[in-house]
Amino acid sequence: MKKLKEYTQEELELMDYDDIAYLILEEKKKKMKINELFKKVCEILKLNEEEFIERLPDFFEILTTDKRFIQLTDGYWDLKEKHSEKLIIEDEEEDIEDIKDEIEEEQENEETDDFYDEETEEEESEDDLKDLVIIDEEDEEN
Protein backbone atom coordinates (compact mmCIF):
# COMPACT_ATOMS: atom_id res chain seq x y z
CA MET A 1 0.00 0.00 0.00
CA LYS A 2 1.23 3.46 -0.87
CA LYS A 3 2.19 6.01 1.74
CA LEU A 4 0.25 9.26 2.03
CA LYS A 5 3.02 11.39 0.55
CA GLU A 6 3.10 9.17 -2.54
CA TYR A 7 -0.46 10.18 -3.49
CA THR A 8 -1.12 13.23 -5.63
CA GLN A 9 -3.48 15.89 -4.32
CA GLU A 10 -6.01 14.85 -6.96
CA GLU A 11 -5.86 11.21 -5.83
CA LEU A 12 -6.32 12.23 -2.20
CA GLU A 13 -9.33 14.41 -3.04
CA LEU A 14 -10.98 11.43 -4.71
CA MET A 15 -10.49 9.26 -1.63
CA ASP A 16 -13.03 8.85 1.16
CA TYR A 17 -12.31 10.25 4.62
CA ASP A 18 -12.11 6.79 6.14
CA ASP A 19 -9.50 5.64 3.61
CA ILE A 20 -7.33 8.65 4.40
CA ALA A 21 -7.84 8.10 8.15
CA TYR A 22 -6.80 4.48 7.66
CA LEU A 23 -3.56 5.55 6.00
CA ILE A 24 -2.88 8.10 8.75
CA LEU A 25 -3.36 5.57 11.57
CA GLU A 26 -1.32 2.98 9.70
CA GLU A 27 1.60 5.35 9.18
CA LYS A 28 1.51 6.96 12.64
CA LYS A 29 1.28 3.55 14.32
CA LYS A 30 -0.53 5.07 17.30
CA LYS A 31 -4.09 5.63 18.40
CA MET A 32 -5.59 9.09 17.94
CA LYS A 33 -8.54 11.08 19.22
CA ILE A 34 -11.22 11.67 16.61
CA ASN A 35 -10.66 15.45 16.48
CA GLU A 36 -6.93 14.99 16.01
CA LEU A 37 -7.46 12.34 13.32
CA PHE A 38 -10.01 14.36 11.37
CA LYS A 39 -7.83 17.47 11.69
CA LYS A 40 -5.09 15.51 9.89
CA VAL A 41 -7.57 14.42 7.21
CA CYS A 42 -8.60 18.06 6.75
CA GLU A 43 -4.97 19.19 6.50
CA ILE A 44 -4.31 16.61 3.80
CA LEU A 45 -7.43 17.63 1.89
CA LYS A 46 -6.79 21.35 2.56
CA LEU A 47 -10.17 21.84 4.24
CA ASN A 48 -10.65 24.94 6.41
CA GLU A 49 -11.78 25.16 10.06
CA GLU A 50 -15.42 25.71 9.10
CA GLU A 51 -15.44 22.55 6.95
CA PHE A 52 -13.77 20.66 9.81
CA ILE A 53 -16.55 21.63 12.24
CA GLU A 54 -19.29 20.99 9.68
CA ARG A 55 -18.06 17.54 8.61
CA LEU A 56 -16.80 16.15 11.94
CA PRO A 57 -20.15 14.47 12.83
CA ASP A 58 -20.20 12.73 9.44
CA PHE A 59 -16.63 11.58 9.98
CA PHE A 60 -17.59 10.13 13.37
CA GLU A 61 -20.46 8.22 11.75
CA ILE A 62 -18.14 6.92 9.04
CA LEU A 63 -15.65 5.60 11.60
CA THR A 64 -18.34 3.92 13.69
CA THR A 65 -19.73 2.05 10.70
CA ASP A 66 -16.40 1.16 9.07
CA LYS A 67 -15.28 -2.24 10.40
CA ARG A 68 -11.61 -1.36 9.97
CA PHE A 69 -11.69 1.03 12.93
CA ILE A 70 -12.23 0.49 16.63
CA GLN A 71 -13.14 3.02 19.30
CA LEU A 72 -10.97 2.65 22.37
CA THR A 73 -11.30 4.16 25.83
CA ASP A 74 -11.15 7.91 26.38
CA GLY A 75 -12.26 8.74 22.83
CA TYR A 76 -9.28 7.22 21.05
CA TRP A 77 -9.60 5.47 17.70
CA ASP A 78 -7.29 2.95 16.09
CA LEU A 79 -7.19 0.29 13.41
CA LYS A 80 -9.05 -2.82 14.49
CA GLU A 81 -6.33 -5.08 13.10
CA LYS A 82 -3.94 -3.78 15.78
CA HIS A 83 -6.18 -4.98 18.60
CA SER A 84 -7.10 -8.53 19.40
CA GLU A 85 -10.62 -9.36 20.44
CA LYS A 86 -11.14 -11.84 23.23
CA LEU A 87 -13.83 -14.31 22.36
CA ILE A 88 -15.36 -16.18 25.26
CA ILE A 89 -17.14 -19.37 24.35
CA GLU A 90 -19.21 -20.80 27.13
CA ASP A 91 -20.13 -24.43 27.28
CA GLU A 92 -23.90 -24.34 27.72
CA GLU A 93 -24.09 -28.00 28.73
CA GLU A 94 -21.61 -27.40 31.53
CA ASP A 95 -23.61 -24.39 32.74
CA ILE A 96 -26.81 -26.41 32.74
CA GLU A 97 -25.14 -29.18 34.75
CA ASP A 98 -23.86 -26.63 37.28
CA ILE A 99 -27.34 -25.20 37.70
CA LYS A 100 -28.84 -28.69 38.13
CA ASP A 101 -26.24 -29.49 40.81
CA GLU A 102 -27.06 -26.27 42.67
CA ILE A 103 -30.79 -27.04 42.61
CA GLU A 104 -30.19 -30.57 43.88
CA GLU A 105 -28.03 -29.23 46.73
CA GLU A 106 -30.74 -26.76 47.73
CA GLN A 107 -33.36 -29.50 47.72
CA GLU A 108 -31.17 -31.75 49.89
CA ASN A 109 -30.61 -28.91 52.35
CA GLU A 110 -34.35 -28.28 52.58
CA GLU A 111 -35.02 -31.95 53.33
CA THR A 112 -32.46 -32.12 56.13
CA ASP A 113 -33.73 -29.04 57.91
CA ASP A 114 -32.74 -29.15 61.59
CA PHE A 115 -35.95 -27.45 62.60
CA TYR A 116 -38.22 -30.01 61.07
CA ASP A 117 -40.99 -30.92 63.54
CA GLU A 118 -41.71 -34.63 63.45
CA GLU A 119 -45.02 -34.53 65.38
CA THR A 120 -47.94 -36.04 63.59
CA GLU A 121 -51.06 -34.08 62.76
CA GLU A 122 -53.01 -35.93 65.45
CA GLU A 123 -50.54 -34.96 68.17
CA GLU A 124 -50.62 -31.36 66.99
CA SER A 125 -54.40 -31.19 67.12
CA GLU A 126 -54.48 -32.59 70.69
CA ASP A 127 -52.04 -29.91 71.82
CA ASP A 128 -54.16 -27.22 70.21
CA LEU A 129 -57.24 -28.38 72.13
CA LYS A 130 -55.66 -28.54 75.60
CA ASP A 131 -56.28 -24.82 76.23
CA LEU A 132 -59.82 -24.97 74.93
CA VAL A 133 -62.54 -24.31 77.54
CA ILE A 134 -66.13 -25.45 76.99
CA ILE A 135 -68.82 -23.26 78.47
CA ASP A 136 -72.45 -24.26 78.78
CA GLU A 137 -75.18 -21.84 77.87
CA GLU A 138 -76.14 -21.61 81.54
CA ASP A 139 -72.57 -20.76 82.56
CA GLU A 140 -72.39 -18.19 79.82
CA GLU A 141 -75.38 -16.32 81.23
CA ASN A 142 -73.75 -16.05 84.68
Image: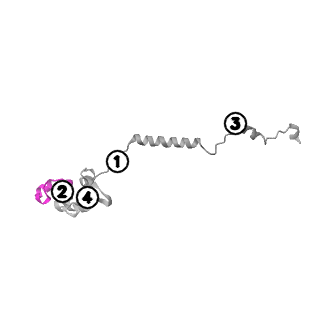
Q: Nearer the viewer, mark 3 or mark 4?
A: 3
**Residue depicted at 18% across the width and 62% down the height:** 43
Q: Which structural element holds mark 1?
A: loop
Q: Nearer the viewer, mark 2 or mark 1?
A: 1
Residue ID for mark 2: 23
Residue 9 occupies quadrant: bottom left
Q: Which structural element holds mark 2?
A: helix
Q: Which residues are magenta?
A: 1-18
- Judging from the image, the colouring scheme is one colour
Q: Position of residue 25 (x, y in %)?
A: 21, 58
CA gap, disc 1 and disc 3:
55 Å
Mark nearer the N terminus (4 vs 2): 2
Mark nearer the N terminus (1 vs 4): 4
**Residue depicted at 78% across the width and 41% down the height:** 130
Mark nearer the N terminus (3 vs 4): 4
Give the class, few, some or many, for how many residues have Cα within 10 Å of label 4's Cα (few <14, many ≥20).
some
Give the class, few, some or many, for how many residues have Cα within 10 Å of label 3's Cα (few <14, many ≥20).
few
Inspect the image, locate mark 4, and give the three-letter code of the amino acid beneath it: Leu
Q: Which structural element holds mark 4?
A: helix
CA gap, disc 2 and disc 1:
31 Å
Check the image and report above or below for 106 versus 5.
above
Residue ID for mark 1: 88
Residue ID for mark 3: 121
CA gap, disc 1 and disc 4:
35 Å
Inspect the image, locate mark 3, and give the three-letter code of the amino acid beneath it: Glu
Residue ID for mark 4: 56
**37 left or right of 139 in image:** left
Task: State the predominant SS element of the stretch in magenta.
Answer: helix
Nearer to the camera, 111 or 10: 111
Q: Position of residue 73 (x, y in %)?
A: 32, 59
Residue 13 lies in the magenta stretch: yes
